[in-house]
Amino acid sequence: MTPTTSIVTTPGIDRRSLLKTVGLGLSGAALLGSTASVSAQSNELAQELNEVRSATQVYRDVATAREDGYATEVSPYVPNMGFHFVNPALVAADASTPVSLSEPPILVYYTTGNYSPGPGAVHDPDRDAELRLGAVEFAHGETGVAGNIFSDETASRTLKVPEEAGWGPIPGTPLSALHVWVHRGNPAGVFNPTNPRVD
């Protein structure tokens, strides 16, 4: 016996109208599924940035950062960036080395209050309390080679600076690095190396 499919009709609605309504419903469901997929992709970058922010907010306390290995000052004061503190054990060997979003190798601090170091000034550890965490940096040991850590290429929003363009050499070192401004808003873009809100 061959199975049959029956459509129950409602008074006042003919079979053709009912089929059209069902078809529109299925198309709408497919469209909603597609929208959900795009939304999930655009949210992936936001989730990644939130992961970095959450994992590193403990380092707003410079003493904690030092205790956890961020004890090496990798640069003197850089205008529109700040002071960079590196944990050498977390620097990736090259661009293809997997990295953890929760363990960036470099923390970038800017100054507050009356602490106004000039370009090239070395940080005074007695003034750690006047530092504020602005950004983190991911770094690897291949000069001039961009990494690929974040899902910005699938994000629906257009970034001012995509991750690939944010990678650049750290002067005086054999490293390439990417700033990620997750603790201090950056109108120039989350992956832009410099931040106009940091003097």
Image: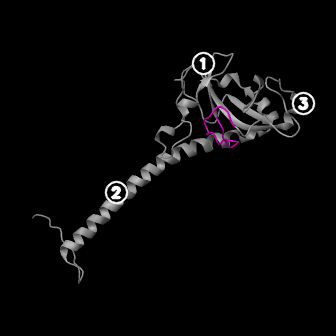
Residue 141 image label: 1
Q: Which x, y percent locates residue 154?
A: 46, 41
Q: CA distance from mark 2 to mark 3?
A: 60 Å
Which residue occupies the extreme left position in the image?
1
Mark 2, other Cα within 10 Å: few <14 / some 14–19 / many ≥20: few
> Mark 2 — residue?
30
Q: Is residue 99 above or below residue 171?
A: below
At 89% from the left and 38% from the top, the residue drawn is 114
Q: Amino acid at mark 1?
A: Gly
Q: Main secondary structure of the magenta part?
A: loop
Viewer can see residue 140: yes
> Residue 1: which disc?
none
Start and end of the magenta stretch?
180-195
Task: Write down the residue under mark 3.
Answer: 126
User: Callout 3, which amino acid?
Assistant: Asp
Label 1 to label 2, Cα distance in Å?
45 Å
Residue 29, quarter of the rendered image: bottom left
